[in-house]
Amino acid sequence: MSFLVEENPARRRFEILVDDALAGFIGYQVESGTMVLVHTEVDQRFEGKGVGSALARGTLDQLRDRGERVRVTCPFLLTFLERHPEYASVVADG
């Protein structure tokens, strides 16, 4: 399985393609100039295959590479961040 995570600004989300099929996304909003990651969704066909974690990593890696800091309200991502403190630098305080 090959994973590709790309931002889709028109839909305000980061999408993951698995073997060229849309497998999930992380939706965001922009509030006061800050990106807020609000929702993660993985297609039922891809659950339990590491797609959610690959999507989280790909999204957070891109944001870190761009020097952005975000707020996170999505429960899945909050749990992911607790387990992966290496991404703490991407999360804005407050």
Image (spheres, rainbow, N blue to C red):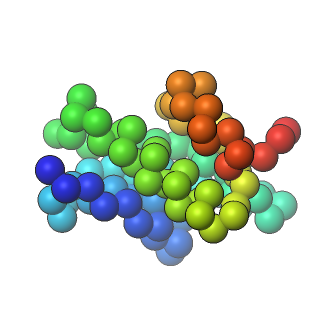
**Left or right: residue 91 compared with residue 51:** right
Residue 42 in view, yes or no: no
**Left or right: residue 92 compared with residue 60:** right
Q: Is residue 41 above or below residue 79?
A: below
Q: Quadrant of the C terminus?
A: top right
Residue 52 spot, x, y in % from top left:
36, 39
Q: Residue lying furthest bottom in this view?
A: 10
Residue toward you, 64 or 77: 64
Q: Residue at x 80, y 65 (%)?
A: 33
Q: Residue lying furthest front in this view?
A: 86
Residue 12 spot, x, y in % from top left:
54, 64
Q: Classify residue 6 by image quadrant.
A: bottom left
Residue 41 spot, x, y in % from top left:
39, 42
**Left or right: residue 32 compared with residue 25:** right
Residue 29 in view, yes or no: yes
Q: Residue at x 53, y 61 (%)?
A: 62
Residue toward you, 12 or 81: 81
Q: Residue at x 18, y 64 (%)?
A: 20
Q: Is residue 85 above or below residue 60?
A: above
Total tally of numbered discs in the picture? 0
Q: Residue at x 15, y 59 (%)?
A: 19
Residue toward you, 14 or 44: 14
**Left or right: residue 68 compared with residue 47:** right
Residue 88 spot, x, y in % from top left:
68, 39
